[in-house]
Every structure is written in structure tokens, then in C-alpha cells.
Amino acid sequence: MLNAMIIDPKDNVAVAIEPIKKGDTVTYLCQGQEKSLTAQQDITIYHKLATCDIAKGDPIVKYGEHIGIAACDIKTGEHVHVHNVTSHREDLEAEA
């Protein structure tokens, strides 16, 4: 049964669509294929978890867009939230 989702295949986080407990199997679809991983922490509904290891300084990608930068190494199945993500503002002046 699916308990998480991603929107874009570039995403490196999935969104929990129900509460997930540490040790639970997290299942989501990516490009029509069912994928699964083990939750390393409790994940609140609608919060994010890493679908792969994310190194400190790498972008967090949700809905195909960069939404922040990893403030520390984040392991597959870990909660991704304000405690381990820093904000990132694109250089909007460069495009003007």
C-alpha cells in the first residue's frame, strides 16, 4: 500500500500521505514503478523523507524544484525538515 508520494522523478524526497513510524516500510510510485525504503524516524503526515542519501550542501528537490539545501548529511529514510534543511534563494538578479 502506498503511504508516500513524489511528483517529479528528479525529487530526492517523498511526502508522507499518512503518519509513518520509524521502521515502517515507505512505499511510493516513481515513473510508474513501486519503490520502497525503511523509515529511519517517525514522519508526520505531509512531511518529507529522503528517498536517497543527500550530502550536506546538496539541494533538496521536491516537485522537481530546489526547495532548500541539506544542512547536514541526510540518510535514506530520514525526516527532511527545518532541522536539517537551510533555505536557498536563487540569484534572481542574474536572470534580469
Image (cartoon, helix red, strand yellow):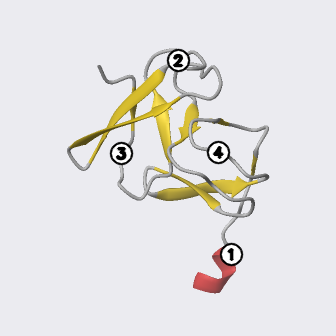
Marks 2 and 4, the one that precedes in the sequence: 2
Q: Give, as a three-letter code, the residue at label 1.
A: Asp
Identify the mark nearer the N-term, 1 or 4: 4
Which is more toward the observer, 86 or 39?
39
Q: Earlier in the sequence, mark 1 or mark 3?
A: 3
Q: CA distance from mark 2 to mark 4?
A: 16 Å
> Where's residue 32, x and y in %?
20, 44
Residues under numbered marks 1 and 3 in contact, where contact means CB atoms less than 8 Å apart:
no
Badge 4 or badge 3: first in the primary sequence: 3
Q: CA distance from mark 1 to mark 3?
A: 25 Å
User: Which residue is tagged 3?
Assistant: 7
Residue at figure coordinates x 43%, y 50% from the top left:
63
Q: Please tell me which residue is depicted at 65% across the width and 25% down the height of the picture.
A: 41
Residue 2 is tagged as none
Q: Which circle's residue, 2 or 1, is located before the other in the chain?
A: 2
Q: Identify the residue under disc 4.
A: 75
- Image coordinates for residue 73, horizontal then vertical, percent: 73, 52
The residue closer to the viewer here, 76 or 72, is 76
> Which SS class for mark 2?
loop
Q: How many marks?
A: 4
| Mark 2 → mark 3, Cα distance in angstroms | 19 Å
Residue shown at the point (36%, 52%) measured from the top left: 8
Viewer-side label of 1, 4: 4
Q: Is residue 8 above or below residue 33?
A: below
Disc 1 from disc 4: Cα separation: 28 Å
Q: Marks 4 and 3, Cα distance to the nearest angstrom?
A: 20 Å
Badge 4 marks a residue whose secondary structure is loop
